[in-house]
Image (cartoon, helix red, strand yellow):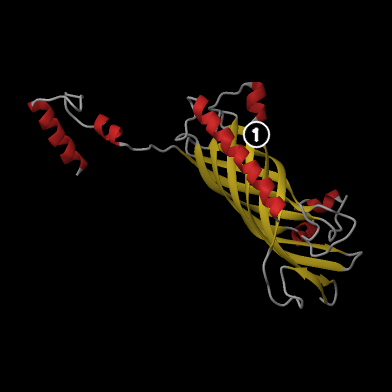
Amino acid sequence: MKNSFKYFLTFFLLIVSTTINFAQYSYNYPFTKGWEIGGNFGLNYFYGDINDNKGRLWNNTPLSSFYYEQKRLMGNIIIGKSLTPYLGIRSHFIFGNIAGSNDKLKMYFNGNIIGLDADITFQYFDYFLKKPESSKFKSYTFVGLGLMKFNAIRHQIGNNLYLGSVGYNAKGDSKTNMITESMFKLGVGVSYSINKFWMFNYETSLNYLNTDKLDALISDVTKLEGYGYMSFGCVYKFNFNIRTKNNLWKSSSGTNNRPHNSGVNNKKKRKLHNKWKR
């Protein structure tokens, strides 16, 4: 747990320092410009010990009933910031369910997962092809780290006999504290802007957790377990202004723009300014 938090904190501080550096040297993307907020919703697929769909590509399409049996719903809330026309940072709050089965082991499991991550996005085609910033279609890749909390309970196929769990009590009939582990993710996405405010996207990613307990089964077969995630989302893009006293003064009316200038005209201007503030 301590190592997981240390890795996540290091990556988060790296992203923050990158943001500050770009904010200082990029005139087109100051701190107040290039923000976005939104959400994605989709399906995940478990990779680990309790999974018997390895190598069977036809079962990973929506035409297969197995596709719907093994996939589970997942969502995430996004807040992000553009650093340049090609580079950005994002943070996600993730929530959903996870499940898997293995006919050879005669086991299946169900679990819950929540977490927080941070990633860096790079619009590679736009960068290498020198596409204009106004292009509606964009493709990008992203890489990030996060902290995930999860629990899982494992049963035997056929008679639903309880076999084991993590994040539950010894009998598996009551949830206790969820397990926390670090997570690494890598993915690609495409987006389409319908106007300067709204954008739709599709993303797919691989998310690996630093654990062999995600399916409540510890073995020598896999040391890292995780899930694939396919999602559609909607993002709202916005800028904001930081209002200061100087901004209020500049926006006031009058012909005299010197705040400390003496005289009758300046007194009248201050009265108008105070009246406008009220």
> Which of 89/21 is in front?
21
Q: Which residue is mark 1?
A: 139
Name which residue lies at 46% across and 34% down: 33
**Residue 217 appears in which quarter of the rendering?**
bottom right
Task: Name the quarter where the N terminus is drawn.
Answer: bottom right
Left or right: where 229 falls relative to 156:
left
Name which residue lies at 66% across and 39% down: 189
Name which residue lies at 26% across and 29% down: 250
**Residue 251 appears in which quarter of the rendering?**
top left
From this view, report whether residue 155 is shown above or below residue 25: below
Which residue of the protein is positioned furthest toward the left in this rendering? Answer: 264
Which residue of the protein is positioned furthest toward the top in this rendering? Answer: 130
Residue 213: x %, y % from top left: 79, 61
Residue type at mark 1 is: Ser
**Residue 144 appears in which quarter of the rendering?**
top right
Residue 138: x %, y % from top left: 61, 33
Left or right: where 243 falls relative to 157:
left
Left or right: where 253 falls relative to 238:
left
Q: Is residue 186 visible?
A: yes
Q: Is residue 202 visible?
A: no
